[in-house]
Image (cartoon, rainbow, N blue to C red):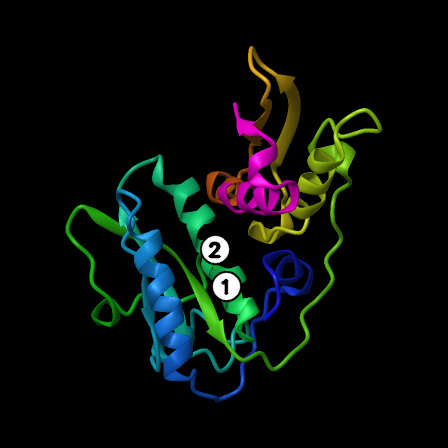
Amino acid sequence: MMTLKEAIESRHSIRRYISKPIPQETVDTLNAKIRECNLTEGLHIQLVTNEPKAFSGRMAYGVFQGVSNYFAMVASKSEDMSESIGYHGEQLVLLAQTLGLNTCWVGLTFNNIKEAYQMESDAKLYCMIALGYGNEPGRNLKRKTAAQVSNADATTPEWFNNGVAAALKAPTAVNQQKFHFQYLGPDGSNIPKVKADKGFSLLGYTKMDLGIAKLHFEIGAGKDNFEWK
């Protein structure tokens, strides 16, 4: 099975899928990871399988095809949850990639099939992640440079530069990449600090995007090499 770093390199956002059921063993592996993610306070992520209505009809027509499986990204209603949704949702995306599946983060173009998942009165559906076996290779999108999203240069550590490179491959809403990583060095200790900030976007989703990018950064940099400021 591929590593998470290899999953970052091979992952693309896929919108068209073939009609092929996900094996039960794979479903069980994904659900085990969901249970781990849902230990985080406020998260109630759920895997929905064999449910084609969310990505059919007017909302998804011409954008998605053949989607019958997805992660329902449910969490409590709180401004602080968007980053957590991004961070933990991308864990599921990368795990799915290692299992031979494809995915796509979806913010708006889906139908909310409320009977397909459970949601308490104090929770909301933040987004969905389409899941399945892709019927297309995906596109290599134009990415920003390391200098545009960080202070990485020849003087910053190799692990930091590797983290920024991994973050640049993170999926973001309409590829907006509104995040920034700053190497701060040790701050009163022997452990270097890194600061991560979201930018502004009229589209929104920047908190969620930051959570996704921070996970990529951790995988690329190695979590033992730094602490978040």
Q: Crowding near pointer 2: few (<14 within 10 Å), some, many (20+)?
A: some
Q: Is residue 57 visible?
A: no
Residue hosting label 1: 95
Q: Is residue 21 visible?
A: yes
Q: Residue at x 56, y 68 (%)?
A: 98
Along the horizontal axis of the image, is 114 left or right of 4?
left
| Residue 90 percent location from the top left of the image | 49, 54
* Residue 170 - label: none
Residue segment shown in magenta: 211-229
Q: Quadrant of the N terminus?
A: bottom right
Q: Nearer the viewer, residue 193 or 15?
A: 193
| Residue 163 percent location from the top left of the image | 67, 40
Q: Secondary structure at mark 2?
A: helix
User: Residue 150, relative to residue 68: is it above or below?
Assistant: above
Q: Nearer the viewer, residue 18 or 9?
A: 9
Along the horizontal axis of the image, is 107 left or right of 116?
right
Along the horizontal axis of the image, is 12 left or right of 124?
right
Q: Residue at x 81, y 29 (%)?
A: 153
Residue 222 on the magenta segment: yes
For the residues labelled 2 and 1, the Cα–Cα distance comes to 6 Å
| Residue 97 percent location from the top left of the image | 56, 68
Residue hosting label 2: 91
- What is the three-letter code of the residue carrying label 2? Gln
Q: State yes or no: discs 2 and 1 in contact (Cβ < 8 Å).
A: yes
Q: Residue at x 35, y 82 (%)?
A: 50
| Residue 6 percent location from the top left of the image | 66, 61
Residue 86 on the magenta segment: no
